Amino acid sequence: MLEWLLAPLQYAFMVRGMLAAVIVGIISAILGTYIVLRGMAFFGDALAHAVLPGVAVGYLVGDGASGPVFWWAMATALLSAFGISAVSRSARLKQDTAIGIIFAGMFALGVALISMVRNYTADLTHFLFGDVLGVSSQDLLLTVIFGVLILLVIIAFYKEFLVISFDPTLAATLRMPIRRLEYLLIGLIAMSIVVSLQTVGVTLMVAMLITPAATASLLTRRLSHMMLIAAALAVFSGVTGLYLSYYMNIASGAAIVLTCTLLFAIVWGITSLLRRRGKTEDHARL
Amino acid sequence: MNLSPQIMPISTPQQRHPEHLPGTSILSVQGLSVGYESGLALDDISFELITGERMAVVGPNGAGKSTLFKVVAGLLKPDKGKVSVFGEEPGGHMCISYLPQHNHVDWNFPVTVSEVVMMGRARRIGMLRWPGGKDREIVEKAIETVELTRFAKRQISQLSGGQQQRMFIARALAQEADLMLMDEPVTGLDTPSQEELFAVLDALRAQQVTVMIALHDLKLASTSFDRVMLLNRRMVGIGEPAKVFTRENLALAYGDRLRFEVAGTEIPFMDDNCCGGEEDHHA
C-alpha cells in the first residue's frame, strides 16, 4: 500500500502536481464558500471561461512559455470580472444576462484565436481541461505566491466579506465601502481562477469553486468550519484525483473534479437519508 | 430581564457629540419629499425625535413608512428637504441601526447568533482587524440584554421569529446605536413574543436609546409608545396616540381602506370612547 502511494512521488512532476493541486484546492474551496453563499456559481463559471482569450494571446505572444500565459490570463480575468460587474450594474439587464453575454463572447474570442493558429490547438486543450502534471517549478512558485496572497487578503477582510455577504443593508448603514469590497472579492475570485487554470482548466473550474464548498455546506452551519471542511475536501480530491490519474490513466483535471463530485454525492446521500430518518422519528414520536 | 442602565457600555460621555445628550433632538426632518417613478412616496414631511423616546409610525401599505426609514438610515437620498441626525447628514453616523422588514437575510447562512451580533461591531473594530476581548464582552452583554444567551452558539435558522428580532436588537446594541429604526418588527409575531420584544425595548429606553418603529397594529401603537406618527405620504398627525388616532385622522390616512385594514386590529377608539376629545363628547 505504502509502495502504491509512494510510487508516483518518485517523479518530480507528480510532486509538483500534488503541491499545485493542494494549494489550488485550498484557495478555490475557501473562495468558493463565498460563491456558494452569495449564489455566484454562474459568475464563477463565466469568469473561468472568459479567461480563454487571455490564455490564447499569452500563449501566442510567449511562444508557448507559461509565464506570459499566466499574466495575460490574470489581466483578462480581472478585466472580465470588473467588466461583468460594471455591465450588470449600469445596463438595464439582469445580472445573469449580462454575465451570459460577456462569458459567451469572450469564450468565442478565445476559440477564434486558437482556431487561427491550428498548431497550438493540442496544447491549448490543456488550458481547457487542465494539465496539472505539466506544472513547472516556476508555475508552482507563482501558484504559491498568489495562493498565500489570496489567503492573507481573505483573513484580513474576513469580517467585511462576511457582513457584505450576509447583510448588505447593515454594511450600508455602517457605511462600509461595499462596492470596493465587492470588487476586491471578485478580484480574488478572478486570481484564484487563473491560479487554478493549470490544474483543472477553464471548463471544469466551476467545480473546484463550488463543489467542495457545497459539500461542506451540507456538513456544517458555521462559515469558518465550512471553509475548513471545503478546503480539506478539495485537498483530498486533488490528491486522490492525481492518484486516479496516475494509475488509471484518466485526465488529471477530470479525475479531480470527479472525486469532488463523488464526495458531494456521498455526503448528500447520507445527509438526506439522516434527515429523512430524523423526520420519520419525529413523526413516530408524535 | 436585566434593566440596569450600565449593562451596555454605549459610549462614554466624552465620546458623544453634544447633541446626543438626553432631552435634545436626536433626529430632525424638515420638508422631506421623496419621489419614485410612480409618484411621491413622501410629501413634505417634518418632525423631530427626542432622545430616548419611542415613536410608532403607522399608516396604510404604501404610506411611505419604509421610504422614511431608508432616508433616515442614509440608504436613500431625499429629493427635497433636510434630514439631520445628531445635527449631521444621515449616513455619516454609525449611531443609527436599521432593521428592514423581516426576511431580509438568508436564514440558512452559516452564522451563529453571536457572530451576527458581532457584525454590528464591524466598523468599530475597523478594517484589517479582528474582534478583541472588549468586542466579545460587548457582544456577550448585548445578547444577555435581549435574553438570548442560551442561543448564542446556535445557527440563526434555529431561532423563532421573536428571537430573530431580538438578535437584531442585540446587534444594534453591539453597534452602540443611539437611534434604532425598525420596520414592522412585530409582524408575524405571537403575543408572548411581542411582549418579550417590548420588554427589551423598555430596557433600551432606560439606556436613552431612541426607537422608531413602523407598525400595522394601531392598538399596540397607542398602548406602547410615547408618540405616534400617522403617515399617508403626507403627515396626517404626530403626537400622543389619543390625539392622533381620531376618527378624522384615521379616515384621512386610510380612506376607503379604513374598514378593510383597521377593522381586524381591535383599535380601542373604534368605540369612540377612549380617545381624547371624543370622550367628552360621549360623557
Image: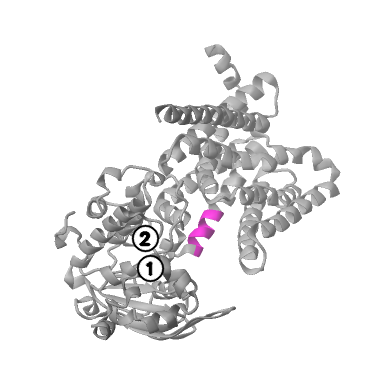
Q: Which mark is residue B215?
A: 1
How many neighbours does mark 2 have within 10 angstroms: few (below 14), some (14-19), or many (20 or more)?
many
Type of amino acid at the residue the image marks with label 1: Leu
Which sits earlier in the primary sequence, circle 2 or circle 1?
Answer: 2
Magenta segment main secondary structure: helix
Please indicate, yes or no, whether residue A125 appears anywhere in the rendered image.
yes
Taking the image as drawn, is residue B28 in sight? no
Q: Nearer the viewer, residue A231 or A59?
A: A231
Which of the chains bears the disc numbered 2?
Answer: B
Q: Is residue A62 above or below residue B264?
A: above
Q: Which mark is residue A86?
A: none
Q: Where is residue A73 in the image (x, y as percent from the top left)?
A: 66, 50
Q: Closest to the observer: B217 or A221?
A: B217
Element marked by disc 2: loop
Residue A167: in magenta span: no
Q: Which amino acid does label 2 sit on?
A: Val
Residue at the spot of label 2: B186
- Residue B85, picture quadrant: bottom left
Q: Is residue A182 magenta?
A: yes
Label 1 environment density (alpha carbons within 10 Å; few <14, some 14–19, many ≥20):
many
Question: Is B206 situated left or right of B214 in this image?
Answer: left
- Residue B263 place in picture, x, y as percent: 42, 69
Q: Position of residue B107 (x, y in %)?
A: 44, 49
**Residue at x-position 62% and y-position 52%:** A43
Q: What stretch is highlighted in magenta?
A: A179-186
Q: Do the residues labelled 2 and 1 touch (CB within 8 Å)?
A: yes
Residue B96 pos. (x, y %): 33, 69
